[in-house]
């Protein structure tokens, strides 16, 4: 890599996400790599929790960034692109849902989150049962509630960001989140009896 290319790469890494999207909208795809480096892990973690099939996650991550590059001109100028990129991933998931079977394996990845070893086999069995009940309770949620729950609880998005991504009023997001939490809590309480 020549000095000019190295300076250009360093310059791109120092730019805000908004500036990178402006460059992409002008036809320069170099900044897409910088955006990918900054945000691919957040998008991947969201998709691990929300995608119906873990095997598709890496393809969906790639597709998210390629789609975002094509939509660069519509980027809203926020300093961080994370909510925009998660929104693109949500739209891709919705498209897949219409094309493929319902999301029956949505929560397969929840059990794959690394956990520290427990002290006894009984503790491990109890934790596995709790995780299975939680996955089952979340899997029974309506799609709208499940997406909101995953976006807020596991992806750390604010209600306003989720509302923008889903194109719904903030009040609707909070209602769906409240209903999802209550429904999961009831299901877990029924299972504990």
Image (tube, helix red, strand yellow):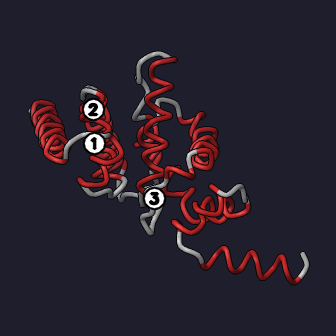
Residue hosting label 1? 148
Determine the CA span between mark 1 and mark 2: 6 Å
C-alpha span from label 1 to label 3:
16 Å
Q: CA distance from mark 3 to mark 2?
A: 20 Å
Q: Is residue 52 above or below residue 166?
A: above
Q: Quadrant of residue 77?
A: bottom left
Q: Of circles 1 and 3, which is in front?
A: 3
Count residues near mark 3 (Cα–Cα under 10 Å), then give few for <14, some for 14-19, many for 20+: some
Number of numbered discs: 3
* Mark 3 secondary-structure assignment: helix
Q: Residues within 10 Å of mark 2 (few under 14, many from 20)?
A: few
Quadrant, the N terminus: bottom right
| Residue under numbered circle 3 | 82
Is 144 located above or below residue 72 in the figure?
above
**Mark 3 vs mark 2: which is more N-terminal?**
3
- Provide the secondary structure element on which disc 1 rests: helix
Give the image location of residue 193, x and y in percent: 8, 32
The outermost residue toward the right is 2
At x 36%, y 45%, the residue is: 165
Q: Position of residue 122 (x, y in %)?
A: 31, 46
Q: Nearer the viewer, residue 162 or 167?
A: 167
Identify residue for label 2.
144
Q: Position of residue 59 (x, y in %)?
A: 63, 38
Q: Callout 1 environment at 10 Å: few (<14), some (14 to 19), or many (20+)?
A: many
Is residue 188 rendered to the left or right of residue 103?
left
């Amino acid at each position: 890599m020549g000095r000019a290319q190295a300076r250009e790469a360093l310059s791109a890494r120092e730019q805000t996400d908004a500036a990178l999207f402006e460059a992409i909208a002008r036809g320069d795809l170099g900044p897409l790599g910088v955006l990918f480096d900054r945000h691919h892990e957040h998008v991947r973690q969201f998709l691990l929790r929300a995608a119906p099939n873990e095997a598709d996650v890496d393809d969906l991550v790639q597709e998210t960034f390629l789609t975002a590059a094509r939509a660069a001109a519509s980027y809203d100028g926020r300093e961080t692109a994370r909510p925009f990129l998660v929104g693109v991933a949500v739209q891709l998931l919705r498209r897949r849902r219409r094309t493929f079977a319902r999301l029956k394996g949505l929560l397969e990845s929840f059990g794959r989150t690394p956990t520290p070893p427990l002290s006894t086999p009984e503790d491990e069995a109890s934790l596995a049962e709790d995780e299975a009940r939680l996955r089952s309770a979340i899997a029974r949620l309506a799609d709208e509630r499940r997406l909101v729950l995953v976006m807020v609880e596991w992806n750390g998005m604010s209600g306003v960001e989720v509302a923008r991504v889903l194109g719904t009023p903030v009040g609707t997001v909070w209602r769906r989140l409240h209903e999802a939490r209550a429904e999961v809590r009831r299901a877990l309480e029924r299972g504990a009896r």
